[in-house]
Every structure is written in C-alpha cells, then in structure tokens.
Image (cartoon, helix red, strand yellow):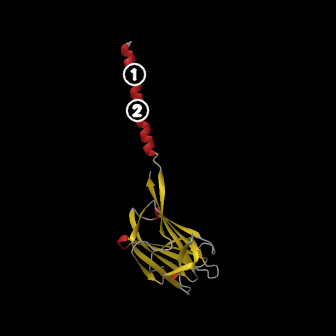
Amino acid sequence: MRYFAMRLITTIFIFAICNLYASALAAEDALEVLPTTAIWVSGALPGQFSVEGNWIWSDEVTQNEAKTHENSLVKGIEAHGFRTDAAARLSQDSKVIQYVKLDADNMPSGIMLKLFLAAGKEIILYWEGDEEAFVELDEYITAWYIGAIPNPGKWTGLEIDFKEFDIEDAELVGMEFIVNNGRVWWGETIIISPVSS
C-alpha cells in the first residue's frame, strides 16, 4: 500500500513538473512584441547634422505645435535633405512614417523620399498624381512607386514598411525630400521598431 502511494505521489509530481515546463514554453512562444515609437525629426534635425539644398523651416504651418520644413515654390524638381550622426536603427520589422501636407493652391505632381543608409546605401520611394512626375529620372535611379499622392490641405502619414526591402539591420543616417512642382510641408518623421517585452 505504501509503495502504491509513493508511486502515485511520484507520478503526480512528475505530471506537475511537465505541466509547468509546457506552460513556460508556451509563454515564451507567445512573448508579445510591442512597437517602440521614436520621433526622429520634429521641428529640429537630430544630432550633429549637415543640410543639402535649400532647407526652409516654416513657423506658419506647424504640426503638433512644432515647425515644419518646406520646399521652395519653384517650377520643376526641387530637393532638400540632411545627414546626421544620430542614426536610427532599422530592421525588416521597422516602419518609417513621414507626415506631409500638400498645398491645395500649389498642388505638386509628385513627391519623393530618399532614405540614406549607412555604408552609402539608399532607398528611394515616390508618390505621383495622374501623370508621371519623375519619368526623366527613371533611367538614372531605382525607385519604388508607392501610390498616389495624398489629398491636399491635411496632414497625411506616408508609411514605409521595411518588410518590402531586403534589409536585415541598417542605420538610417539621413533623408532627402523631393517635390515636382507645387509645395509640400514636411512634418514629423517617426521611426517604429519592435521590441520584446
């Protein structure tokens, strides 16, 4: 009788340990991955930086009470950009959201973003209206068409999902903001990357 009781207790103990181990494995598999959001550009440029082109800050058009930057109101293609030592880390699970507001009275035919990565790499993306806006650049660059330009007069977040690109780990070290005709106000640049918790 005592032998049977000991075997029963041992069996229950082993069963309990197995259940605890299985629960731990399930919890590890279900580890939640939460996004962390960093505002990279908002009213000022990050870190020690250098600018390219005609960089214009606007106090009249703001986003979240922060000044924005805009392109010169000229006919044709205009670009301004920056490079910085305050790099933003990216992975295939990262997203960049660039807020834009298009001038309804000076509607551009297309907008383009260049993302400068470390080691001299870059990613180029563009949005167009009904007509091709960057056809003269096609033979010189490799660019990704993302979609139609957003509606004017309101802030719109242009989302760049790095799952679309062959990137494992990279550092974003700068950006260039390009407009064909018209005027665009460029607001916050936000980096979203997953972190385990």
Q: Quadrant of the N terminus?
A: top left
According to the picture, the residue beneath numbered tag 1 turns out to be 9
Point out residue 121 in the picture as x, y percentages from the top left corner.
39, 72
Point out residue 65 in the picture as x, y percentages from the top left corner.
57, 71
Q: Residue 172 carries which label?
A: none
In three-dimensional space, the C-alpha distance between marks 1 and 2, rounded to whole angstroms, equals: 14 Å
Give the residue at x 44% y 55%.
195
**Quarter assignment of residue 3:** top left
**Quarter assignment of residue 100:** bottom right
Residue density around tag 1, few if under 14, some if 14–19, many if 20 or more, within 10 Å: few
Residue 132 visible in the displayed image: no
Q: What residue type is disc 2 on?
A: Cys
Circles 1 and 2, Cβ within 8 Å, touching? The answer is no
Residue density around tag 2, few if under 14, some if 14–19, many if 20 or more, within 10 Å: few
SS under mark 2: helix
**Quarter assignment of residue 18:** top left
Relative depth, front residue between 88 and 46: 46
Position of 125 relative to 32 (above/below):
below
Point out residue 77 in the picture as x, y percentages from the top left corner.
52, 84
Relative depth, front residue between 50 and 89: 50
Mark positioned earlier in the residue sequence (1 or 2)? 1
- Furthest residue toward bottom: 75
Position of 116 relative to 163 (above/below):
below
SS under mark 1: helix
Position of 29 relative to 105 (above/below):
above
Comparing labels 1 and 2, the label whose residue is closer to the camera: 1
Q: What residue type is disc 1 on?
A: Ile
Point out residue 133 in the picture as x, y percentages from the top left corner.
55, 80
Give the residue at x 64% y 82%.
105
Residue 105 visible in the displayed image: yes
Position of 23 relative to 60 (above/below):
above
According to the picture, the residue beneath numbered tag 2 turns out to be 18
